[in-house]
Amino acid sequence: MVSGVAALTDSLRAALSANRVVVHGPVTPADAAQHVVGRALLHSPGGDVAVSPADRLVAELGIVDHLKAAGTNVLLPGDVGWRDRLSAAGLGVTGCWLAVAETGSLALAARVGSPRAVSLLPPVHLCLVAVDDIVATFSGAIARAAGAPLPSALTWVGGPSRTGDLEMIQTFGVHGPSTVEVVLVA
Amino acid sequence: MTHGIVTPGESFAERATNAVANPDLQRALRNLDIRLHTARAVADTTPEMKDQAAELRREVLADLDGWLDTLEASLTRVGATVHRADTPADARRIVLDLANREGAHTIVKSKSMATEEIDLGAALESVGIEVVETDLGEYIVQVADERPSHMITPAIHKTLDQIASVLETRADGPLPVEREALAAWTHDHLRPAFLRAEIGISGVNFAAADTGTITIVTNEGNGRLCTTWPRVHIALMPIEKVIARFGDLATLLPLLTRSATGQSLSNYVSMLTGPRRDDESDGPDELHVVFLDHNRKALVGTAYEEILACIRCGACLNVCPVYRKVSGHAYDAVYSGPMGKILTPLLSLGEEGRDLPGASSLCGACTEACPVEIPLADLLVRLRADLRAPGPLLPLPAPAGLTSPIGHHRLPGEGFAWPTSQAPLASRPPPRSTRHMVFGAWSRVWSSPAGYRASAAAARLGGLSPSGWARRVPLVKGWTATRDLPLPDRRSFRARWAARESGAERW
Ligand code: SF4
């Protein structure tokens, strides 16, 4: 089993890349927000950027304020027309509860301010991952989850939406995001 | 059955013959080779992992009623509503009542074999509700008015150009025969259905009794959409899907996804504990979980109980030499392949699929592949014997009458239990009839390579066509009508191997 933050980060990066996730960083907390702004301008120019404001890194790094300062239309849960606008947003930005190095999975916990659909409806999902939140194995992650009250939805995302239904050849971008990017934050 | 007939035939034998003669189907089935790697991925999982998973499944089956009560209490505690359905008709009525109450116009469905089992789609459509299958493979077979031919990859029987022409019937213009483009079209075409549906229906992969958490795995994200956006989520759960503890997912889930697709974890795993909570922005307002029995409880405590350990990974289909050649539709049943041959007659208590257990070479590949160590080949042999008597399959035999050790009771290191399953045959008095004597002589001749070659050569000399010659052996037509033995190659296996090893011939 891999241990140590650097080794865990490396193996998470390898597993995510194998899952077709674009991995950035690790960047410093100070640089992370600018990085997110850059990706937002690229993926949703002039469009809505949906954000899960209650996710820890999103809140701590002041992502919403940075995005607003850069002139993007930030779409927050509770905004008028949130449901209708979400499907048209170009990008969804979330944090994650933890990430699993072994499987390259991002564990997202639904709660107030962290809806399920921000990582699901927009065509691009950008996920902030604190390197301290990387666990080595899926069984380790399940043990952690079992030790706390479970959220209404605990979702494990491996990468972009895919199907094997077309002659069993992996094809990307069916119902969920066709692009998933991760920003590792040191 | 309301679906179009894909592989026609009155019996399995007829349908299988037609399937083998269908060149498009045979071309599509070659894609199954990809899944052979998944069989290897299962083999790579440690025996300890399989043993542990097998134990966990048996632990639940040993007290199925008790675990279901615990699950119901947990689900209720987290705000879900539990419905119990004894029969497929009960389950359909429960869902129809909910749909009625909601005034539902559109229902989106995530892939679920259980909904196929109770033919739910047709029931909903018959009252004018639009039902949209959202798994791409399921959508393809829905549009084609067919039935899934594989529990993990429902449209495995179709080639890409066939898929494009099926989808084209729902498109405004021609669709390119190109995978990424077809996936993108599906995204755009089905997204509005997710947004307008009042109800999402899913199956359940695992339901944890201690926490009331239901787990659903998909790769496309349709399972997430069905359980996130509509106001009501209905999960149809065959009762054996209950697991004791949330923590058991650490063992069972990776084993399922590895055996199913070779992935260390599926792309999307949703662990749902109750409906949306106060002030959450999405997730269903209501979560209904329908426990489906459909004669499963009748299997508990019988020799066939083990089939309820199945986690629907499809590995036994992928490795089965019969399935790989004839595909799912030849079984004319919801569940196909080795597990389907067992489950279909059992769930219908002998009314359906009586000829299915015979559709096996008893090679034991399914038993080897099964990640939860179900002795599939043993169960097939047993079921053949029990179905010999006409009429319903009741009462089911108790495990005490078993002649072979089953499942995790096998001795360590012991593989497929051939000797035990053959024991009762060997202990019978020697055969007397002409038929038996012919078989005896035949088997003696064919037991030796020289004898086999000699008889094949004789067949050639006799002007028989190379294919189908064994069918013409007199006196044993019942046996040979559906079986054939290919003529041996002119060269020995060792000569051909050497030619390929040296590169003189292609593999
Ligand atoms: S019987 Fe075993 S191999 Fe076949 S689908 Fe079920 S769990 Fe998988």
Image: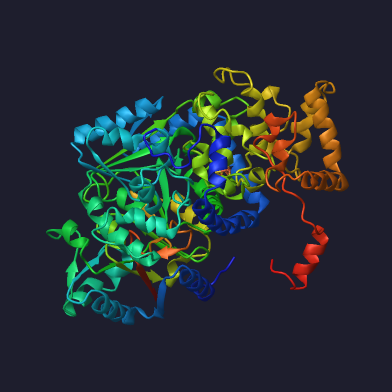
- What residue appears at the point 77 percent right and 55 percent down from the top-left corner? B489
Image quadrant where residue B1 sits: top left
Picture coordinates of residue B215 (x, y %)? 42, 47
- What residue appears at the point 18 percent right and 72 percent down from the top-left corner? A47
Ligand 1 lies in quarter = top right
Residue sitting nearer the eye, B29 or A95: B29
Colour scheme shown: rainbow
Picture coordinates of residue B105 (x, y %)? 20, 41
Residue sitting nearer the eye, B415 or B15: B15
B35 sits left or right of A115 in the view: right
- Residue A186 appears in the figure: no
B423 sits left or right of B90 in the view: right
B139 sits left or right of B485 in the view: left
> The C terminus of chain B appears in which quarter of the rendering?
bottom right
- What residue appears at the point 49 percent right and 54 percent down from the top-left corner? B24
Give the total of numbered labels: 0
- Rendered view: B87 above or below B373: above
- Residue B419 appears in the figure: yes
- Rendered view: B412 above or below A25: above
B30 sits left or right of B428 in the view: left
Residue sitting nearer the eye, B379 or A131: B379
Picture coordinates of residue B248 (x, y %)? 52, 46
Image quadrant where residue A72 sits: bottom left
- What residue appears at the point 66 percent right and 34 percent down from the top-left corner? B481
Picture coordinates of residue B377 (x, y %)? 66, 37
